[in-house]
Image (tube, helix red, strand yellow):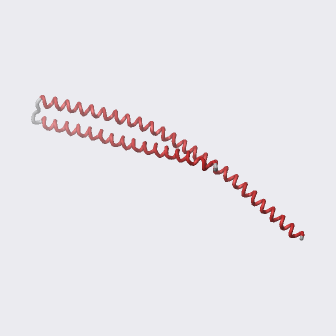
Amino acid sequence: MKRSERLKPIMALAEQKERDAASALGFLKNKIDAEEQKKIQLKEYGLEYHQQIIESGKQGVSGATLRRHYEFMTKLNDASHQQNGHIEELQEQVSQVQQYWLGTQGKLKAFEKLVEKAQKEEQVIQDKQDQKVMDELSSQAYARRLQSDNF
């Protein structure tokens, strides 16, 4: 079996790892986008809720209602901070997966070059063998002509 043929299963594994890493990277980036959207929704909800309290406050609000408002806004703020932390964790994961993906790309390119080099070497050997056969056939034809000219 030719060297380039023996390298193909290894290259297929490298291609699969690169595809898997790219897929994981895409998944994480989509996850970050979704989490960013949740963060925006939390902020918008907090603003809407706050606006409702302001509107109802124009008609007078009890101390208990203000306390509940404050407690709820605190919970929303905590949820927003928690969401920020979650997004930061995902961004760290993206960074790690991106480094892994770049590594798999490097390995894949190295295997591609290795296979290409092996194929070129095999082609040189095949070309030499073909030339040897052609030289042999040419020599035989020349020898037959010489023999037929002598008779």
Comparing 151 with 93, the one in front is 151
Please say if 26 is above or below 68: below
Residue at 60 percent of width and 47 percent of height: 6
Q: Quadrant of residue 135?
A: bottom right
Residue at 48 percent of width and 41 percent of height: 101
Residue 71 in the image, given as x and y percentages of width and height: 20, 30
Comparing 37 with 89, the one in front is 89
Comparing 48 with 137, the one in front is 137
Comparing 69 with 6, the one in front is 6
Please say if 120 is above or below 142: above
Residue at 81 percent of width and 61 percent of height: 139
Please say if 128 is above or below 44: below
Q: Quadrant of the C terminus?
A: bottom right
Residue 62 in the image, given as x and y percentages of width and height: 11, 30
Q: Quadrant of residue 110?
A: top right
Whether residue 25 sits left or right of residue 56 in the image: it is: right
Which residue is the extreme one toward the right? Answer: 150
Residue 20 in the image, given as x and y percentages of width and height: 46, 44
Whether residue 138 sits left or right of residue 5 in the image: it is: right
Q: Quadrant of residue 41?
A: top left
Which residue is the extreme one toward the front? Answer: 1
Residue at 58 percent of width and 45 percent of height: 111
Whether residue 15 sits left or right of residue 74 in the image: it is: right
The total of numbered circles placed on residues is 0
Residue 126 in the image, given as x and y percentages of width and height: 69, 54
